[in-house]
Amino acid sequence: MSQVALKSQAVTAVTPPLQTPLPDLRPRYRAAIIGLGETDNQFSHGSKQAKTQTHAGAYAAMPDIRLVAVADSDPDQLHRFVERGPSVTGYSNYREMFKAEAIDLLSVCSPTPLRHKIVLEGVQAGVKAILCERPLAVTMDEAAEMVAACESAGVVLAVNHTRRWEPVYLHAKRLLAQGEIGCLTSLAGYYPGRAFTVGTHLFDLMRFFAGNVAWVCGDAMDRGKVELSLSGYLRFRSGVQGMVVSGCDGTDQLFELDLVGSRGRLRTSGNGARLELVRFEEGSSGAKTREPLSNPVEEPVETRSEQGQGIEAAVRDLLACLQAGGTPACSGRDGMAALEIAWALCESATRGHRRIDLPL
């Protein structure tokens, strides 16, 4: 056999068979959480909430994301989370976390007065997307600075007004767009109290259906607490009328929204668990009036399952915006607008129910 043939055989013998390369299943994005409070925010794995209703649970549900770090100044909260949670590094100082970790997605769940500084420092640290709890900030100036910093740096900023991603409200929005109740003429919202912590959820939801607010008149339901509970009247730029009704002490957890149109009505109840569609039908008596005829509405199964709900859906939305561009369902500017309504109602209440025009 020739020398050339031997070389050819040797090459053939050591050449491995062709194989399809295995996909890289490692998470592409690194996430971190600042603020692990259980009693208020309930974001640790010791929470009574369902897994996907926590920031940690939402990240755990995403194959493309790995939670790598958490920060909290409370050593007990930090120890409890790290002990029960996934394999993450815990930091008592979030600034040390920013120095040590490369973070893509950041959840800001700290007390409200700290959010402004954390978001600004997160942007400086190179974070690519931020999911901030509500309210976005304490003051309008702080909120505006946070939004401007994120927009200038190309950081995606979402505010966790969770109902923007809840199936019942999304389905109600579709029914409204399809003309099921005609043109929207008014809406009324009920919440248990605490205008900034809970009320901003409602104010954001009302903007979701009726657009921007032109002016408000407000009334303080209680004046002796740290956070006011505010009721009032909202006039939207679209001409839609709005009413906000607050509970006095927050004991009864009533959160409902009632939308009335030219041909019917949509009403949510059970804190977003149920949706009722009412149509105005001609009365049997022959009078020139119409009577309400109501039916419970079951949202389509795909609506409930395709994106999850609550915080999980918010994180999916944030990730999609990070990957492909676009604006989150509840952006930084949406969060700022909800905060502005709360402050406008507060200003009106302190001025003897005077009309307050927006923007402030």
Image: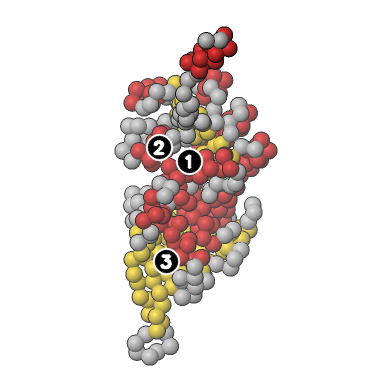
Residue carrying label 3: 266
Q: Residue 315 carries which label?
A: 1
Residue appearing at x 38%, y 40% in the figure: 52
CB atoms of marks 1 and 3 within 8 Å: no
Label 1 and label 3: CA atoms lie apart by 28 Å
Mark 1 or mark 3, earlier in chain: 3
Residue carrying label 2: 61
Image spot of residue 122 (x, y percent): 58, 30
Residue appearing at x 58%, y 43% in the figure: 324
Label 2: state its secondary structure.
loop
Label 3: state its secondary structure.
strand
Q: Considering depth in this image, is 43 or 76 the residue closer to the camera?
A: 43
Among the 4 quarters of the image, the one containing residue 79: top left
Q: Nearer the viewer, mark 1 or mark 2?
A: 2
Label 1: state its secondary structure.
helix
Label 3 and label 2: CA atoms lie apart by 32 Å
**188 relative to 99 in the view: left or right:** left
